[in-house]
Image (tube, rainbow, N blue to C red):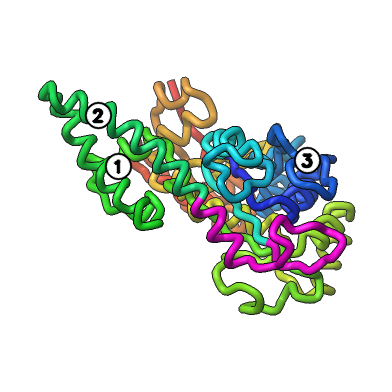
Amino acid sequence: MSFSIGIVGLPNVGKSTLFKALTKKPVNISNYPFCTINPNVGIVEVPDNRLKKLAAISKSEKITPTVIEFYDIAGLVKDAHKGEGLGNQFLAHIREVKAIVHVLRGFTDPNIIHVSNRVNPKEDEQTINLELIFADLATVEKRLADVEKKVKSQDKTASKQKVVLEKIKAALESEKFASTVELTDEQKPFLKELNLLTAKPIINVLNVDEDNIKNVGAIHESPTIRISAKIEAELADLPPDEAAAYLKELGLKSSGLEQIIKKSYEILGLITFLTTGPDETRAWTVTKGAKAPEAAGVIHSDFQEKFIKAEVTSYNDFIAAGSELAAKEKGLTRIEGKDYIIQDGDVIYFKHG
């Protein structure tokens, strides 16, 4: 299971520089708006230190991490929802991703043009948020017009949908995201069906100057993650050991990539389970709350349909025991059935028909 993250923001805030650093993929980062028209897509391995340790114990021939897809979506501008700056095309690209990384400019560089000739991340955030809201409002109003026609013909489903649409419309008109609307469990699937931009999880990322990377609270208080795209670019060019040493030298515990992925997992409600053996040690991603047959289905659909049981060992117990056999002998491996809820770090062997 892979998941997709769209990197958005105003032009020249460092989106493409960040994308290039994260994916180690060359992209056009020219100093002018809309140099990125079609989204660049890069596949990034999700860092997981547990894999190497498991592979060493199992003497695995290969290690396969789970992956994340990053989409570098061209810079939005004010009135993008009206088509300004090819905005409608860019907004359509955002609808395809599971979550959004919103890059805000906190760095000062007179050589890099800002579309408003100033550095104000708070205003930039408001500009992009309003464009997402206006785009969703257009979607909701169009859907509402269709639903109201069906309501007149006594369509009960349409009547229920109308209630949801009116709630969302009221929120958007108050400049609030669709994700803030309180809905019942019965109503939530319809919100998902609408595929609204403001219903997607959003991670705010502030791109700052290198010397301001640890100055928490300065410039802008809202973003979840503070990074320097320049530092990320430098890290991307270094071997893993040198990158780790450079991070330590900077006084940083983790890279921007690791912070973004960790936060992405959190807001999307994802966890990782592991499989290991002589052939391969591998990470797999499932939604939090997934049961054993569903996790087996991530490996192969037949495993879900013909699921019998799962042999489960927690990662810490597996490492402490020193081998799969030792974990079983010490009673650290459990036999779980169809109702078992997968936990992050479970090392699993599935039995199937």
Residue 49 percent across, percent down from the top left: 69, 55
| Crowding near the residue tagged with mark 3, few <14, some 14–19, many ≥20 C-alpha atoms within 10 Å | some
Picture quarter with the C terminus: top left
Say what amino acid the circle numbered 2 marks: Val
Q: Which residue is mark 3?
A: 35
Q: Which residue is mark 2?
A: 147
Left or right? Give the position of 165 relative to 5: left
Left or right? Give the position of 195 relative to 45: left
Write down the quadrant of residue 26 in the picture. top right
State the SS at label 3.
loop
Q: Is residue 214 above or below residue 25?
A: below
Q: Which comes sooner in the sequence, label 1 or label 2?
A: 2
Between 22 and 142, the one nearer to me in the picture:
142
| Range drawn in magenta | 105-130
Say what amino acid the circle numbered 3 marks: Cys
Residue 184 percent across, percent down from the top left: 23, 47
Q: CA distance from mark 2 to mark 3?
A: 39 Å
Between 216 and 57, the one nearer to me in the picture:
216
Q: Report the residue at 70% width, 52% height from top.
A: 53
Q: Report the residue at 74% width, 58% height from top.
A: 114
| Crowding near the residue tagged with mark 1, few <14, some 14–19, many ≥20 C-alpha atoms within 10 Å | few
Which tag is nearer the camera, tag 3 or tag 1?
3
Q: Are marks 3 and 1 in contact (CB under 8 Å)?
A: no
Q: CA distance from mark 1 to mark 2?
A: 17 Å
Write down the quadrant of residue 61 in the picture. top right
Residue 131 percent across, percent down from the top left: 52, 48
Q: Which residue is mark 1?
A: 188
Q: CA distance from mark 3 to mark 1?
A: 37 Å
